[in-house]
Image (tube, rainbow, N blue to C red):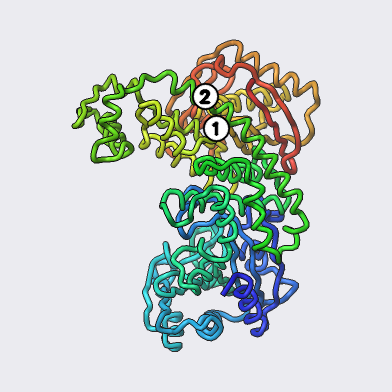
Amino acid sequence: MDRKQLIKKYIDFFKSKDHKEISNASLIPENDPTVLFTTAGMHPLVPFLLGQKHPQGKRLVNVQRCIRTGDIDAVGDTTHHTFFEMLGNWSLGDYFKKEAIEMSHEFLTKELKIPSEKISVTCFIGDKDAPKDTESEQIWKSLGINKIKFLDKKDNWWGPAGNTGPCGPDTEMFVNDVEIWNDVLMQYNKDENGNYIEAKQKNIDTGMGVERTIAILNGFDDNYLTDCWQPIIKQIEKFSGKKYGDKEKETRHIRIIADQIKAAVFIIADGIIPGNSEQSYVLRKLIRRAIRYGYVLEIKNIVKEIALPVFEIYSDYQHLQKNKELILEELEKEERTFEKALEEGSKAAKKILGNKISLTKEKSEKLRNGKESLRELMKKLISKKNQGKDYSYKPINLSEKEIDQALITGRDAFLLYQSYGFPEEMILELTVKQRLLYDEIGFQKELQKHQELSRTASAGKFKSGLSDNSEATTKLHTACHLLNQALREILNDKNIFQKGSNITPERLRFDFNFNRKLTDDELKKIEDLVNEKIQEAIPIKLEELSTKEAKQRGAQGVFDKKYGDKVKVYSIGNFSKEICAGPHVDNTSKLRHFKIIKEESSSAGVRRIKAILE
């Protein structure tokens, strides 16, 4: 069975059960500032799950295109995808557990021809908030399904989407121990006090991933072997000369390129172009990650060609076909922009590597000829160094000085990775070529910090806006503090507060409460005041204070439950004092020159300033 056959079979089945097909909504959520992308089929239906009447009735079905970026760095295995399609059927206060489970069983066994003995399910085990879901268990047993396992909230509970709202247990279906479908049984409402109350409107929300289901039906243990991916993969094979499945590392790289390009095509089709904020930033990251791994496979300037099969696979998406020329143009434009960024990255790499002293050829060869790989050996050496242990390692002895002189730190490596687009494999290749050591452990720590930013694309808005702790973002983060205080002084309004920020290595974006457009004269005065404080070379002081003391000292911050007993307070002389997690430079002189590049409306009563450091 292929993709189009599965989708048609699913939609037709639920139409026969009196469900109305609803539209496949845009990847960009409408009137929802809490997420960047549509992450599930239920996302566009939230108002109706909360009780609003849907114009098409109480029984709905569709296939929904989705983007999830929380696991973007996990893409490369056999199951993770940034873009995917989700089949779903919903009951908005109509049928509930019995009918939902019976229809799921019927579709699996009658329509998809999966034998009952191959199906197993999970149900909610119960806790202090809700009882064990024996009702679902009994329904499954009545259908002849006896392989039933009970799991806790982590595995068999959905929601609420925020702190309050609809939620409930779910029951998941597996075929040969691989998950194929999930029925969410929205039985409760969580109130502001954390209580779970029986919902007046009980809903059903189901989700079946198209890619995974096709893989299961065709007996594949790798989703990328399905028709959703193979045309793209064959195009990558054609240009790279590499064969999918031959070598594990190369296969992983092919998956990453295919995944990121497909997701980029769909995001552009919904009106987003590469940039440095929100959805545009995610899009830029996807395209550049694909290009980077293309370089690892020794292919360049082929983004357009790799994208072409996407239009063939998804010929049923008319908006994709209609915007084909624009999509390909934006992909090529971003590829050219990224090439220029890589040129700057090469200069940065030369500077970082040029300050190191290579190991002798003899010692380097001994390292590479040892029983363990150079990467594994470096892990051991760095681990020993971090633990303050002996650095000697047979068949070669390396002194502490030799390690320090030859070491590319995790922070330096991550700067090349995040700010200039160097994939880790390229960094490793450079260090091996120059007989240097590379702190992979440190790099992974920096990467984990960065991944928190990516996860907010699924869980909510960008929060701190700090994508990494590189020198560039640290400077811009400090500049936000100066800008915040300058706004308060020039606009003569002590009630101005930061409403949000997003920082990339290239620029800062700062949102603040204000009810009108700033004049050119005001912007000039704000810019001049920030630069005045930069020129004064003011030391920046960090103190750890109790929340009460920080408030008494006049530190800026919204004093609510978000703060713990202790907070970090950064003071820039007598000019600015803010509660903040950091990081910051130690002196304003390091910021050089501040320039506002744009001032605009962000939302009602909120203005947005974008600025850079020159």
Q: Where, by quadrant of the figure, is residue 311 drawn?
A: bottom right
| Residue 96 or residue 394, whichever sits in front | 394
**Residue indicated by mark 2:** 348
First-in-chain label (2 vs 1): 2
Residue 130's image quarter? Answer: bottom left
Q: Give the quarter of the figure containing the N terminus.
A: bottom right
Q: Position of residue 137 (x, y in %)?
A: 42, 81
Q: Secondary structure at mark 2?
A: helix
Query: Residue at coordinates 52% horizontally, 16% vertically from top-left?
Result: 587
Q: Residue 346: tell me if it is visible.
A: yes
Q: Position of residue 421 (x, y in %)?
A: 54, 36
| Disc ID at residue 329 | none
Classify residue 33 as left or right of residue 259. Answer: right
In front: mark 2 or mark 1? Answer: 2
613 or 556, which is in the foreground?
Answer: 613
Q: Residue at x 31, y 24 (%)?
A: 361
Is 53 situated left or right of 551 in this image? right
How many C-alpha atoms fall within 10 Å of the one at disc 2: few (<14), some, or many (≥20)? Answer: some
Where residue 512 sits: x, y (%)? Answer: 67, 35
As shown in the figure, which amino acid type bears the numbered disc 2? Answer: Ala
Q: Which residue shows up at 60% across the image and 64% down it?
A: 85
Q: Is residue 39 visible?
A: no
Q: Amino acid at mark 1?
A: Ser
Residue 172 drawn at (x, y percent) = 46, 72
Crowding at label 1, few (<14), some or many (≥20) Cα neighbours within 10 Å?
A: many
Q: Which residue is mark 1?
A: 419
Q: Decide: is 525 above or below 583.
A: above
